[in-house]
Image: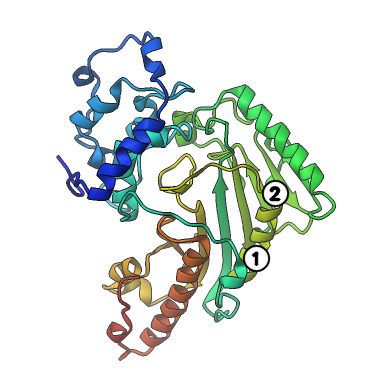
């Protein structure tokens, strides 16, 4: 039963599917001898599962993908494993409940991943994703009211072409990526002074303010991301401490810049300069953009956030509607009265457009908060149209 929306067929999609199918290699599944039953016998119990995966997956869809495997050996049960290990909760935002084991997974299992991406991002497939990482195209972001905006962060995830993703890669692949990272950062040492640390020798005190330690969480252990932890997991830290590049965590690379002020334009510029310098052959698919392990991050792989001090707005009855219209997500940031506001989606817009929506949205949220400080203040006239 479809809990989100029925599997609609679009004219453009009918043309697009055969193209993806033609790119799929000869199915290596025929060479594997797995001791499995029929698709009906193996279909998981999703009755209490609260993930996007469970909302999308049907027995017919499971049958369609059951006898398939990518060149590196990813089967469909590997894809849906996260949602079976962590079925989610009825309250709160839905998780995608699935991962790709390699870039080919998005081709071979496109019928499933397309529906997940549509449901999670509200994005009609197939699209035409573009990329724009030019900070000169960003307007504002360096002029937030410091009484409300207190910190910011920008994260970008990328996967390197030719390697399985951390959810599926072997030790040899992981170690080879670590070796490549050492070489790249060694070549960049003069322009970007810093040091590469293995996770085994890293301590929280070495990290810059706002950059948190990556650990082998229970979910990462269950989904295979933390296999052999911390073997070949590392982080490059800039000399100033405001830049970090995590290696072999949930994706091959995650670039992070965090600031103790709200100048997200400066944070975005700092990350963009590093990104352009170290840019490798990252995985790009025309219809998805930058491809990473989680369908929740495809498109740009970008998560930008601003920490806001808010007292009145979080209690307003229209907050959820306002955030949806602004395409933003808000959650407590740890400190009492401080909330992390970030882009809710990563696909359908360029990197600059996503940060611009965040900048414009944060400014509007601050105006609303100020308005509500007046006991007679009303924000109904400030509610925006859908972005």
In the image, residue 95 sits, relative to residue 107, either above or below, namely: below
Can residue 86 be seen? no
Residue shown at the point (22%, 28%) measured from the top left: 45
Q: Which mark is residue 278?
A: 2
Kindly identify which residue carries mark 1. 269
The quarter holding residue 310 reads bottom left
Q: How busy is the neighbourhood of tag 1: few (under 14 within 10 Å), some, or many (20 plus)?
A: some
User: In this orientation, which residue lies closer to the viewer: 381 or 252?
Assistant: 252
Measured from the top left, where is residue 342 in percent x and y?
46, 63
Q: Which mark is residue 314?
A: none
Which numbered disc, 2 or 1, marks the residue that appears first in the sequence? 1
User: In this orientation, which residue lies closer to the viewer: 386 or 69?
Assistant: 69
Residue shown at the point (34%, 22%) measured from the top left: 68
Q: Residue furthest right?
A: 190
How far separated are the C-alphas under marks 2 and 1? Answer: 15 Å
Residue shown at the point (53%, 30%) measured from the top left: 164
């Amino acid at each position: 039963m479809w809990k989100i929306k029925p599997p609609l067929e679009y004219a453009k999609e009918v043309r697009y599917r055969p193209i993806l199918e033609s790119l799929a290699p000869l199915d290596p599944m025929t060479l594997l001898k797995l001791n499995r039953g029929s698709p009906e016998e193996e279909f998981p119990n999703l009755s209490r599962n609260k993930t996007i995966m469970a909302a999308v997956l049907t027995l017919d869809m499971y049958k369609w993908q059951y006898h398939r495997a990518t060149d590196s050996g990813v089967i469909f049960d590997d894809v849906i494993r996260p949602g079976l290990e962590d079925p989610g909760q009825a309250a709160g935002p839905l998780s995608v409940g699935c991962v790709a084991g390699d870039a080919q997974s998005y081709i071979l299992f496109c019928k499933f991943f397309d529906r997940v991406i549509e449901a999670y991002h509200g994005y009609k497939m197939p699209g035409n994703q573009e990329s724009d990482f030019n900070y000169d195209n960003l307007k504002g972001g360096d002029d937030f009211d410091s009484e409300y905006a207190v910190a910011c962060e920008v994260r970008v995830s990328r996967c390197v072409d030719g390697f399985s993703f951390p959810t599926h890669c072997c030790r040899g692949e992981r170690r080879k990526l670590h070796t490549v990272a050492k070489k790249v950062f060694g070549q960049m040492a003069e322009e970007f002074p810093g040091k590469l640390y293995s996770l085994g020798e890293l301590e929280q005190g070495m990290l810059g303010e706002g950059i948190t330690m990556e650990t082998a969480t229970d979910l990462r252990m269950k989904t295979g991301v933390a296999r052999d932890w911390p073997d070949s997991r590392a982080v490059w830290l800039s000399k100033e401490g405001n830049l970090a590049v995590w290696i072999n965590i949930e994706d091959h690379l995650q670039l992070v810049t965090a600031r103790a002020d709200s100048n997200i334009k400066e944070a975005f510029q700092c990350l963009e300069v590093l990104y352009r310098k170290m840019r490798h052959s990252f995985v790009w698919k025309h219809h998805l953009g930058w491809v990473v392990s989680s369908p929740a991050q495809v498109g740009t792989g970008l998560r930008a956030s601003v920490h806001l001090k808010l007292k009145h707005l979080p209690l307003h009855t229209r907050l959820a509607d306002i955030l949806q219209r602004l395409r933003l997500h808000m959650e407590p940031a740890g400190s009492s009265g401080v909330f992390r506001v970030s882009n809710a989606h990563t696909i359908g817009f360029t990197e600059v457009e996503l940060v611009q929506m965040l900048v414009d949205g944060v400014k509007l949220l601050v105006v609303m908060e100020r308005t509500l400080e007046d006991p007679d203040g009303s924000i109904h006239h400030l509610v925006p149209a859908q972005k």
